[in-house]
Amino acid sequence: MLDWLGTIIQGVLLGGLYALFAAGLSLIFGIMRLVNLAHGDLIVLAAFTLLSLATWLGLDPFLATLLAIPAMFAAGFALQHVLLNRALGRDLLSPLLITFGLSIIIQNGLLEAFTADSRRLRLGAIETASIELGGNLAIGVMPLLTLGSAIAVVLLLNLLFYRTALGRAFRATSDDLEIAQLMGIDHYRIYSIAMGMAMVVATIAALYLGIRANFDPTIGPARLIYAFEAVIIGGLGSLWGTLAGGIIIGLAQTVGAKLNPEWQILAGHIAFLVVVVLWPRGLFPRAED
Amino acid sequence: MRPPILETRDLTAHYGDFQALYGIDTVVAPGETIAIIGANGAGKSSYLKAITGLIRAKPDSVRFEDKPIGALGAANILKLGIAMVPEGRRLFSSLTVEENLLIGSYGRDVVGIWSLDSIYGLFPALKERRAAPSHTLSGGEQQMTAIGRALMSNPRVLLCDEISLGLAPIVIRNIYDAMPRIKQSGTSIVLVEQDIAQAMKVADRVYCFQEGRVSLSGRPKELTREQVHLAYFGH
Amino acid sequence: MANGDVNQLIELAQYRIETKTRASTILALGGVALVLIFAVLPVFAGRGLIQDLIFVFYMLALAQCWNLLAGYAGLVSVGQQAFVGLGGYLLFALTIGAGMDPIAAMVLSGLIAAIFAVPTAFVVFRLRGPYFAIGSWVVAEVYRLVFAQFKQLGGGTGTSLPPSATNEIFGIEWVKATFEVRSPAARDIITYWIALALAAGAPLLVYLVLRSRYGLALSAIRDSEATAESAGVDSFRTKLGIYVLVAAATGMIGALIYLQKARISPDAAFSVLDWSAYVIFIVVIGGVGTIEGPIIGVIVFYALQRYLADFGTWYLILLGALAISIMLFAPKGIWGYVAQRYRVALFPVRRMLVRPHE
């Protein structure tokens, strides 16, 4: 029994990581309806950036993240401003192919720069530290921090969306682009800011990804699919939904792994399909679409 | 005669291969209220869309305070002080009433007569519903919110696209009762309307569109029913 | 009825609906000639060229199928690799397990893939637009992970097609004698002809579907599903029909691919990169929603692969940059751009109202 409790806790904590992967994507998809196939690779790019900063400047990963955040915001803003703003507005296929091209370029660029070797962000003892809960149950400190960060990110983003003028502008643009333009909202600037924010979230996700497991230039697409599953399960425009979605995928994967280690990823996908067949618009979709 | 605040000269508009406007000439004097009437498909909405930059127009075909604005995009039009109350209200569905009003001043935040307080004064019903999600409002409340949203930018010109559409007569009267106060604030108003009676009551001048052309213009008092009927229907 | 009205009626009755253009008739003859030339190519060509062409043909066939699904029916699927892999595994199962002739197995694989497509459709059709795209990808991943569980078919590492399974392929003796080659080369030639048939048949199939009433329903659904439904189009059944048809074709093509490769593994057979990303690249770069587009696209893709693949990562970076550039500057693809500029249609599917004496 306690064994299963431990599994569930692991699943929820894993969900925190997936929620971080998904939060940036949720932002982008919710505000500009962009299916960003390069999102996973952008997280990996951020991870390599953190690795480089940590190595060259001798910083620990957390400090490196703080340092990287403004730069990553600028990078996301620039990416949207220069390229992705032009991808939008027409149909589903152009952005799909453009972000696919971006994904390939990032992956192979990273391969050229860093080779295919596996990397890791090193933190020292805290990487494997855990908190004893009694009865043979222990929670890893890093997974707990990960979930905590995911919740903090969602809280902060929601604060932005619901308590600030910029947040109102984001929601208005997402609701009705044409009327938002009539209200004087420069939607291209809004999108660039959103992408900048998404990159910041991706950087935080990269931090926890890199500490938890080895990474190399090619792992982007797998992360992407979990992120999409979380966003879709959660429902368009709901960050709490995305968090819930991440946790559901994490739980499904861990429970599946417990039944049979080979079933881990399959279990996640099956959970996704079940939820999506029952609630095609996700668990917490907005009132109108 | 003061120069017009807004005028269109030989305005044409296309949707792909389809031509909606064939050379529209209109003039709005500062502080004036003009009404545009016409049957469905006559081009009234296209006229407004061309002014607000939602459809492309030649730079010189729309002039604001004698400057050509025809080629400007929608966001820039608002910044100049031309605000639109769109057809069908089109409130932002995930925003509350108050948030919809607040977003009205996002693109053009100028000090003026219109603010949250004065708009709640104009439409008291909205104050009660200020925290309600906009999609839970009645048609009339939505229309008031849409007008308030446009006013929040303290516009020089207010464009109203079919504000009586889909509303009960008593609700329409309610909304039009607010017009005098809006006029008082010095705003010029362009009313595109299907409800000819209401439009003629508040307008200083009227234009009638028929199949993309101006078929009649003049002061309401000076136009006979027969003239309007002919201009509206074409026969 | 007044005389004038009768005359008007008579004139109206003489209007026809046509899809032919002069260019298209020339092309039809040219196309037949081209297919015949390709058919006799094995007489002159070396094995390397034959194998290259097999690749070109099956990629073209896959592209035409995806185009029908996404470009015409509006079902943007990132999960067609499910049926490619399914077809491949079915071929292996039927030839190794049931000792079937590979060609018969190929056809049967297509039919069985169609059967699998039905429940698959019921799951993915719950989703729309981008959700449908991701959902179809997830479903393909499920196929991949499930097949990796089957130890009989090699599990995660896969399995090979033993020569015994393919040396008995229909017609191989005739080919060996006529072309004076040994079994492997003869197998290649037969595979080549099948691939040619698929590559020629796919555009033809798409053309026929679009010219049929089915095709008109598809256009209506693509433009506006709600409006189409109110006009009496059963959009679910129409989409289901296309999805199943494309799955059958894709399954057959998958069977052919793995007949030629003779080695299968879940990661390769259900690869989203090889069977979706590159196929989508081909269709969209060439021009989605046109029959000519994928033909252009596959030529471009083949040229890139043939001459630049040696450059490894730089080749892929170039591919990505090309995808981005073409989407920015010619969003309708190369053929889309050409067709718009010069108003040409080699496979005319638009229905034109033609006056009596034109």
Image: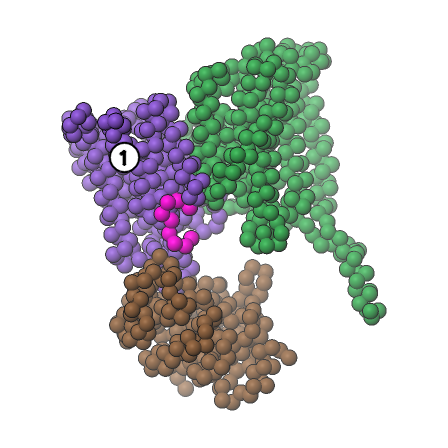
Chain colours: A purple, B brown, C green
Q: Quadrant of residue B171?
A: bottom left
Residue in the image at 53% along x and 74% along y: B24
> From what the image shows, is residue C66 above or below residue B204?
above
Residue highlighted by disc 1: A12
Within-10-Å neighbours for mark 1: few <14, some 14–19, many 20+: many
Residue in the image at 39% along x and 77% along y: B174
In front here: C7 or A216?
C7
| Residue kind at label 1, given as amino acid type | Val
Location of the C terminus of chain B by quadrant is bottom right
> From what the image shows, is residue C127 above or below residue C155?
below
Find numbered disc 1 in the image and state the secondary structure of the residue it sits on. Answer: helix
Identify the magenta region: A281-289
Q: Is residue C302 magenta?
A: no
Q: In this view of the protein, can residue C106 be seen by the observer?
A: yes
Location of the N terminus of chain B by quadrant is bottom left
For this orientation, the residue located farthest to the front is A1
With B162 as the anchor, is C357 left or right in this view? right
Residue in the image at 23% along x and 32% along y: A143
Where is residue A258? Give x, y as percent.
32, 24
With B204 as the anchor, is C186 left or right in this view? right
Where is residue B61? Give x, y as percent.
48, 71
